[in-house]
Amino acid sequence: MQAIVQADTAGLARNLSLATVTPSFTSRSIVLLLVALVGQSFLIQTLSAQPANLPDLTGIWDGGGRARPVNGENIPWGEDNFPVLNERAVAYQQVWEEIMAPKYDCQPASSPALQYDPYHMEVTQWPDRVLFRYEKDDQLRTVWLDGRQPSAVDFSVQGFSVGHYEGDALIVTTTNFVFDVAGFDDYNGIPSSSQKTVTERYWRDGDDLRITLTVEDPMFLRAPASYTTRWIPAAKGYKIAAYECDAESSRAMIKFFPSKYK
Amino acid sequence: MNIRRWLLAIATTAGLALLVTPGFAHHSSTPFYDSSKSVSIEGTVARFMFKNPHAFLYLNVTDASGATAEWQVELGAPVSLSRTGWTPDTLPVGMVVKVTGPPARTEGATGVLGRRMTRADDSPIVSGGRVEEVTPPR
């Protein structure tokens, strides 16, 4: 009885298989064709919405000491462009001390600090997105060019970035950051909130890649704050290195800090 | 040698002038080290931690009274040091090195920020490298 059931089951399976092979193949082909057509149409629409001569930002860029002064308490936020802080930000600064910075637990830097860290980064331009891969903290930012918007859950350390080309420049707008106790500048203990908006304008200046970056955050800043800087082309053959932040190495000097909290 | 070749030679020499501690970028040294002071030590490598964001060197240092203490030396980021020829094997256990730099701020701590560093015979750690940080501490 068991053998008969098995035989019947096998026969049924064969029949089903025979009955469905041809239609399944055909419908799969149609679906694939439709997907290809829709994809092609989308690609054409995306490309046609972009300027004919896109700025070539692609490559590996050196943001180290050869390109610009290394970041610190007065760089890139110095006398000329230091942000105007509100009372809330000043209160945070008053309780702040250096070792509170999440970087000592290997939390990655975010905008606007990440762009000024003196490391290499790689830019890749695709029709529907631009990828920024940072050597510092192994970070990857995706800038969407296809019109998508963040959902209610798209909050992260790097936020959600959308962009478009405008003349010879790439314009990037990033929102949906998570709160960060040192998210504006960890050298000066200035936090940032989920209301932070970072606007970046990238363009080529000869061999250099330049950026003007503007931060708005009504939770902590009275007015937008900006800096402009540059990257230079990386040495020929250079490849982005792995950072792989190590928790022990990140905190090893903490014991040398004379805390004001006893 | 024409001017172009001279410029090339100068550029090549500059490229070989490697720093022992490339500029700090992860954090400022000021909160942890007192750059108004300087300390010099000579010791034997007990451990070399070649990890980002900062390489750390641990040295067994014997003072004038014969007492030995472990000193922690902060160096640059391996991601930068690697570009100047450093590897995890650059400072093997047992190697003798000399270090000079601002001492740790905590009272009685045995720590230093490596601004100048050489082998026991005062030669650079990495062949052809510079022995002293050119950027003043922040």
Image (tube, rainbow, N blue to C red):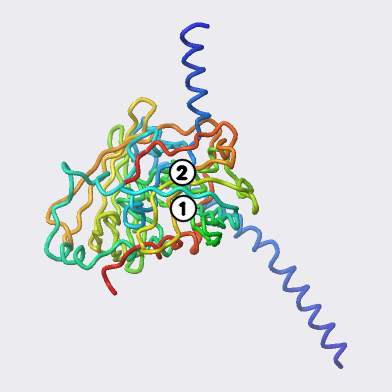
Image quadrant containing the C terminus of chain A: bottom left
Q: Residue at x 46, y 42 (%)?
A: B116
Q: Residue furthest top?
A: B2
How far across and how far down the image is residue B108, in percent?
40, 64
| Residue at 81% over, 83% down | A8
Within 10 Å of disc 1 (Cα), the crowding (few <14, some 14-19, many 20+) is many
Q: Is residue B53 left or right of residue A160?
A: right
Whether residue A84 can be seen here? yes
Decide: few, some or many residues near mark 2? Use Cα within 10 Å; few <14, some 14-19, many ≥20.
many
- Asked whether the viewer can see residue A147, the reply is no
Name which quarter of the figure residue A176 lies in.
bottom left
Q: Nearer the viewer, residue A7 or A76?
A: A76
The N terminus of chain A: image quadrant:
bottom right
Q: Nearer the viewer, residue A42 or A7?
A: A42
Given the image, what chain letter belongs to the residue carrying mark 1? B
Mark 1 / mark 2, whichever is N-terminal: 2
Q: Looking at the picture, does residue A55 appear above or below residue A178?
A: above
Q: Which residue is mark 2?
A: B21
Horizontal side, residue A197 vs residue A236: left or right:
left
| Foreground pick, A234 / A33 | A234
Q: Which residue is mark 1?
A: B74
Mark 2 and mark 1 in contact (Cβ < 8 Å)? yes
Q: Is residue A209 left or right of residue A25?
A: left
Residue A18 vs A54, above or below: the answer is below
- Residue A16 position, x and y percent, is 72, 73
Task: Estimate the x, y position of residue A221 in percent, counting from the top left.
Answer: 16, 57
SS class of the residue under badge 1?
strand
Tag 2: residue type? Thr
Name the secondary structure under disc 2: loop
Q: Chain of mark 2?
A: B
Distance of label 1 from label 2 (alpha carbons): 9 Å
